[in-house]
Image (spheres, coloured by chain):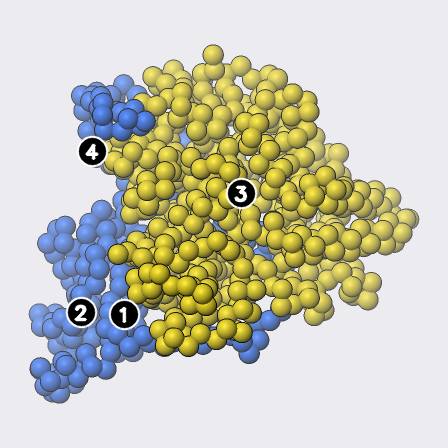
């Protein structure tokens, strides 16, 4: 009998970036890098554990834009081309570094890795890695949860109940399409919670969600067990709170594991380091230097004089960090199990892309941690959130505090002087989409297509990623352009539909570009 | 950067030709307001109160805390179409009127906003404690004597030992800035 439980929650998300109008598009690399560095390593980690008969549990969200991109034939084809280019580059690198053994061994490591990615992606998964995650859910190791349609930041969209409802309903519909069952839980984008979202969660059959720590700690009435047990809201929906200590151990810049000096340095990349003539065919087609994914140095310290990366040393450190993580969770559980009338749960949510992309050794850390918990741990086990609810159904009734996991804990990241211009257009767009849906209850043919495309454009404009990128000051132009383009396309469609003057060619072209949610029904926005 | 300067970029409308003020509660002590005042609304004001009053007055926001029945004025720039309003009270219902003012005591409202509630930033003082089976929500409710259960399961000492007071819980999120609170900080360093 375990004294408590640990729930690892991975949130996998990328915004919808697909540009068929260009032969080569820089931002599509976000997906390719995430497939190679995070999604394939995670699948390999989970499958190795299964082969070794290690019992483990992970709760994981795969957002609708990510699911759509991962199953898109154009992007799948482009990912394979991307891999071929990387294999070509690593072969050049093996030759170039033949007299530098410390780098040559790494060039060979990357060559092997990219060839392995190709074998897994193209040959083993038949280009569809979503199926690999689905299989892991089907055998009970993963519990995949839903997310809002385009990762819209719900607290700021909540001026329009129709906009929130469309985000959640289409998110749930997309989940059912890919996984064949209804989702039990949802990842609220950016952990953005406001009580207003609950009615839509309830109407869509969602049973639980995750909030930032203070979403639970400041709930009303005061939760007896802090974040160590979920609460049930007055709408009957269960809310789990993020554990503070385990977050800090992974996220903190000063104390967090990923900042260890022996881990691979994210920023030093041959795309920046090598001679331009040599590397030019492997960087941006417009000549800008970018990351290639081939990195030869360890973090070393706050210095530009980096030491060569040693994977063996780094992976040994990942095992030590896994042991440290387990020890600290065990301490928490032993301490709280004494004073609680139920087994405490420690909820540890992270961005999935942290593992492998930023923290290269992250998947190995997960693998080592899961293996050690299975073989050595007597005090606690791994659990999914749904499993915990089933074994501990009696919960305190309380209303979480409006919150997010962004800086300062509320809406500031997505609403500040850099990005506040977005919201008057998003709110107006939602109002106009509802107006269109109410006025066109039974549209058919071209008008129906235009109405559905208007809904797609509005949803794409609502992605929280654009406001976030604008705030962080990197790739700002792209994010601002995406926001303006989707709002602009929506407004053109609005006027064309109102004037009964739909531009068929333009609509066809726009639908070809923004082809997310092919089964969308614009009537989701109707409030009549 | 591909396509950034593409001529296909759509210009956003400067206005939607309406009169409207919208509030968003940004955090416990800040409300964001944006508005649009149509030309006809301005004409309506002049017709009703005269051009002299229009010239003498300045735009202002009357911020009303409906939970505490209090209000204050914020004088705003003539050309502003949004404002960040600092407020004192958490967990309170707010409404804002946009209008014209000559002094602190003389305000003519033109439009009224939606309501917003400022979020909390402290541990709730309510210790009314009920438990239920979430699967049969509302059917069986187990009540506990207030305070007793909180004394029995004293979790607050744990959070104190972590070195954080309730006011600082939210600051835990700042750590995410270092490693990218969403995937984008990770991808965005190029």
Return the residue nearer the eye: A36 or B60: A36
**Cβ atoms under marks 2 and 1 closer than 8 Å:** yes
Q: Which residue is mark 4?
A: B126
In this view, A161 is above or below A486? above
Q: Which chain is yellow?
A: A
Task: Give the mark, 2 or 1, whose residue is nearer the N terminus.
Answer: 1
Snapshot quadrant of residue B120: top left
Q: Which chain is disc 4 placed on? A: B
Disc 1 designates what residue?
B35
Split into 4 quadrants, where in the image is the C terminus of chain A? bottom left
Real-space CA distance between mark 2 and mark 4, rounded to the nearest whole angstrom: 36 Å
Q: Earlier in the sequence, mark 2 or mark 4?
A: 2
Question: Secondary structure under badge 2?
Answer: strand
Mark 2, residue position: B111
Chain letter, blue in picture = B
Q: Residues within 10 Å of mark 3 (few under 14, many from 20)?
A: some
Q: Label for residue A178?
A: 3
Q: Say if residue A217 shows up in the picture.
A: no
Q: Position of residue B138 (x, y in %)?
A: 23, 29
State the separation of the CA atoms marked 1 and 4: 37 Å
Q: CA distance from mark 3 to mark 1?
A: 41 Å
Left or right of residue A127: residue A96: right
Q: Position of residue A248 (x, y in %)?
A: 49, 37
């Amino acid at each position: 009998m375990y004294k408590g439980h640990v729930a690892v929650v991975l949130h996998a998300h990328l915004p919808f970036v697909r540009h068929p109008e260009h032969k080569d598009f820089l931002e599509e690399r976000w997906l390719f890098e995430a497939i190679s560095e995070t999604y394939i390593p995670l699948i390999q980690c989970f499958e190795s554990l299964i082969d070794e008969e290690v019992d483990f549990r992970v709760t994981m969200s795969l957002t609708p834009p990510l699911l759509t991109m991962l199953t898109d034939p154009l992007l799948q084809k482009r990912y394979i081309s991307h891999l071929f280019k990387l294999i070509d580059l690593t072969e050049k690198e093996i030759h170039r570094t033949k007299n530098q053994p410390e780098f040559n061994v790494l060039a060979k490591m990357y060559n092997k890795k990219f060839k392995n990615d190709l074998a897994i992606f193209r040959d083993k998964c038949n280009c569809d890695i979503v199926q690999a995650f689905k299989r892991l859910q089907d055998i009970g190791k993963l519990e995949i949860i839903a997310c809002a349609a385009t990762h819209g930041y719900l607290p700021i969209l909540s001026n329009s109940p129709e906009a929130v409802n469309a985000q959640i309903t289409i998110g749930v519909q997309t989940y059912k399409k890919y996984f064949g069952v209804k989702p039990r839980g949802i990842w609220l984008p950016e952990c953005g919670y406001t009580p207003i979202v609950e009615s839509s969660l309830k109407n869509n059959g969602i049973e639980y969600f995750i909030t930032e720590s203070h979403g639970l700690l400041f709930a009303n009435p005061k939760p007896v067990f802090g974040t160590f047990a979920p609460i049930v809201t007055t709408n009957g929906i269960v809310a789990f709170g993020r554990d503070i200590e385990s977050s800090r151990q992974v996220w903190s810049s000063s104390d967090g594991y990923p900042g260890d000096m022996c881990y691979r340095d994210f920023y030093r990349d041959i795309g920046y380091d090598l001679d331009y003539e040599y590397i030019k065919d492997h960087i941006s087609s417009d000549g800008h230097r970018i990351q290639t994914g081939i990195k030869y140095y360890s973090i070393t310290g706050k210095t530009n004089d980096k030491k060569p990366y040693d994977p063996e040393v780094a992976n040994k450190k990942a095992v030590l960090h896994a042991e440290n993580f387990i020890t600290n969770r065990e301490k928490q559980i032993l301490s709280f199990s004494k004073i609680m009338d139920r087994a405490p749960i420690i909820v540890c949510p992270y961005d999935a892309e942290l593992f492998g992309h930023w923290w290269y050794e992250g998947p190995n850390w997960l693998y080592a941690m899961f293996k050690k918990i299975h073989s050595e741990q007597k005090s606690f086990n791994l659990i999914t959130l749904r499993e915990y609810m089933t074994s501990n159904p009696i919960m305190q009734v309380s209303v979480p505090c409006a919150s997010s996991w962004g800086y300062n804990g509320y809406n500031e990241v997505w609403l500040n002087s850099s990005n506040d211009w977005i919201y008057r257009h998003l709110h107006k767009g939602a109002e106009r989409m509802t107006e269109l849906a109410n006025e066109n209850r039974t549209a058919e043919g071209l008008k129906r297509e235009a109405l559905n495309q208007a809904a797609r454009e509005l949803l794409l404009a609502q992605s929280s990623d654009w406001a976030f990128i604008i705030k962080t000051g990197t790739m700002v132009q792209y994010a601002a352009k995406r926001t303006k383009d989707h709002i602009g396309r929506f407004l053109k469609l609005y006027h064309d539909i109102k004037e009964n003057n739909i531009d068929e060619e333009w609509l066809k072209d726009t639908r070809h570009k923004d082809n997310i949610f092919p089964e969308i029904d614009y009537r989701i926005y109707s409030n009549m | 950067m591909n396509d950034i300067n593409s001529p296909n970029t759509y210009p956003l409308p400067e206005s939607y030709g309406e009169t409207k003020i919208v509030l968003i509660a940004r955090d416990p002590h800040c409300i964001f307001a944006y508005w649009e005042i149509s030309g006809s609304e301005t004409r309506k004001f002049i017709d009703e109160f005269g051009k002299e009053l229009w010239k003498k007055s300045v735009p202002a926001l009357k911020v009303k805390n409906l939970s505490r029945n209090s209000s204050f004025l914020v004088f705003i720039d003539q050309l502003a179409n949004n404002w960040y309003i600092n407020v004192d009270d958490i967990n309170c219902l707010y409404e804002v009127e946009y209008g014209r003012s000559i002094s602190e005591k003389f305000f003519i409202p033109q439009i009224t906003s939606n309501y917003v509630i400022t979020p909390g930033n402290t541990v709730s003082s309510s210790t009314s404690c009920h438990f239920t089976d979430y699967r049969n929500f509302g059917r069986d409710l187990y009540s506990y004597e207030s305070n007793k259960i909180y004394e029995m399961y004293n979790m607050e000492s744990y959070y104190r030992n972590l070195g954080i007071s309730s006011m600082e819980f939210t600051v835990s999120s700042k750590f995410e800035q270092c490693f990218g609170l969403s995937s984008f900080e990770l991808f965005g360093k190029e």
